Image (tube, helix red, strand yellow):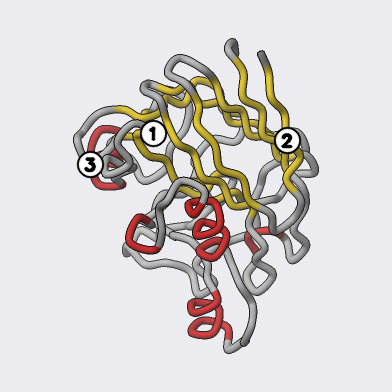
């Protein structure tokens, strides 16, 4: 069985991907950031852990062949297909509060608020949000280990760019189709994405 969902600009999605099944995210028009969290669906206290993931990958940028590890050092998802290459692991999610801090704008909600909406359906909330992955996003780090002043730069994802994940356990995925317009990550104009869950790649 296959389930496909079109996620509008600024929208969100959450759902359980059974062990062995596949989750494909498609950047339909290109240049769109997608914020991502994941958990053990059978025990959500076990969740994505950036330090374990980065230590296993030996890089700040994730791509095909890397796994998303939990705080129990077990893979929740494996990246089996990637036409983007180098997804961000350090920029975190935007939020109404961070937009106020960084860009001096009020009332601009972000991916954190979307995460809260997606988590609510699974009786999870603020305490369950951890540093996330940003698919199709780039946060450059200079040789001096500094970030650029915008933190994010414009996504280089082309129309139809995909990343396909395979669930290594029954996995809860929470996705925010980033609404950010105050930095270049979405080229100032967020667009739709497609989420596809299937038994085969």
SS at mark 2? strand
Give the secondary structure at mark 1.
Answer: loop
Q: Nearer the viewer, residue 6 or 120?
A: 120
Mark found first going from the N terminus, 1 or 2: 2
Residue 97: x percent and y percent? 49, 79
Q: Earlier in the sequence, mark 2 or mark 3?
A: 2
Residue designated by label 2: 5
Badge 2 crowding class, 10 Å Cα cut-off, few under 14, some 14 to 19, many 20 or more, is few
- On the image, which quarter does residue 46 sit in? top left
For label 3, the SS is loop
What residue is disc 1 on?
Answer: 41
Q: Give the label, 1 or 2, closer to the camera.
A: 1
Residue 71: image tag: 3
* Residue at point 22%, 41% (across, down): 71
Q: CA distance from mark 1 to mark 3?
A: 14 Å
Q: Looking at the picture, how far across and down is residue 192, in whole percent?
A: 77, 47
- What separation in Å lies between label 1 and label 2 (alpha carbons)? 20 Å
Q: Quadrant of residue 178?
A: bottom right
For the point 59% across and 52% down, the residue is 176
């Amino acid at each position: 069985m296959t389930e496909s969902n079109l996620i509008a600009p600024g929208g969100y999605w959450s759902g359980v991907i059974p062990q062995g099944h596949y989750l494909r995210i498609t950047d339909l028009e290109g240049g769109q950031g997608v914020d991502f969290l994941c958990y053990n669906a059978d025990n959500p206290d076990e969740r994505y852990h950036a330090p374990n993931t980065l230590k296993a990958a030996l890089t700040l940028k994730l791509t095909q062949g890397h796994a998303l590890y939990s705080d129990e050092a077990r893979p929740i998802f494996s990246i089996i297909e990637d036409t983007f290459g180098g997804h961000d692991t350090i920029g975190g999610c935007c939020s109404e509060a961070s937009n106020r801090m960084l860009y001096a704008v009020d009332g601009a909600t972000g991916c954190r608020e979307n995460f809260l909406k997606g988590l609510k359906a699974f009786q999870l909330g603020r305490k369950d949000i951890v540093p996330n992955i940003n698919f199709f996003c780039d946060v450059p780090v200079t040789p001096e280990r500094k970030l650029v002043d915008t933190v994010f730069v414009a996504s280089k994802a082309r129309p139809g760019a995909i990343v396909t994940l395979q669930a290594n356990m029954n996995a809860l995925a929470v996705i925010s189709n980033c609404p950010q317009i105050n930095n270049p990550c979405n080229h100032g104009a967020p667009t739709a994405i497609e989420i596809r869950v299937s038994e085969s790649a």
